[in-house]
Amino acid sequence: MHLIEVLILSQAITRQRIMMLFNTLVTVVRTEFSSTDLHFKLAVLAFKALHDRLPSYLAEDCQLVAVTGRRRLRSSHIDTCQVRRTNTRFGDRSFSAARPRTWNSLPIQLRDSELSLGQFRRLLMTHLYKHIFGY
């Protein structure tokens, strides 16, 4: 083979590998962002439910532990939602179980009751991007 044919063949293989890696990267980023988008929406809905900005039928499954408990816990000053117990994996994915679980997974700084909705959204996006990109 001539040198030109070898170069053309090696570039074709390189392009094919690059495109394969690029497609893999795009797939990974899409799944990460779609998961992040879901967490963002669930966390914002939980924030609105806890701050009485949602109708009662949407807010009733997101109750704070301090409000629903019979006795005062040491962790009652931290806004933690009561997660509904489910028996199946399908039930774990339900809206009434996923939203409180998402809220409880947020850092304490984001669960501050003094934050406005705009501040919460900004801090939440920063937190989620740091989680995606590993900062």
Image (cartoon, rainbow, N blue to C red):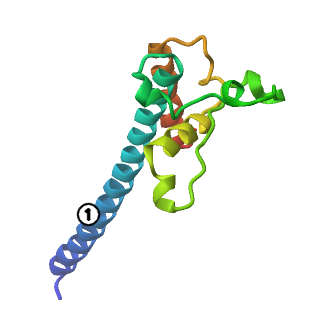
User: Is residue 135 rendered to the left or right of residue 31?
Assistant: right
Q: Quadrant of the N terminus?
A: bottom left
Q: Quadrant of the C terminus?
A: top right
Nearer-the-camera pick, 42 or 122: 42
Q: Position of residue 66 (x, y in %)?
A: 71, 26
Nearer-the-camera pick, 71 or 32: 71
Question: Dot 1 corresponds to which residue?
Answer: 19
The residue lying at 42 percent from left, 49 percent from top is 32
Q: Position of residue 62 (x, y in %)?
A: 54, 32
Residue 30 shows up from this direction: yes
* Residue lying farthest to the right in this orientation: 74
The kind of residue tagged 1 is Met
The residue lying at 48 percent from left, 24 percent from top is 49
Q: Position of residue 68 (x, y in %)?
A: 67, 29
User: Is residue 50 rendered to the left or right of residue 65?
Assistant: left
Q: Using the image, determine if residue 118 lies above or below residue 58.
A: above
* Residue lying farthest to the front in this orientation: 70
> Element at badge 1?
helix
The residue lying at 53 percent from left, 22 percent from top is 50
Residue 18, picture quadrant: bottom left
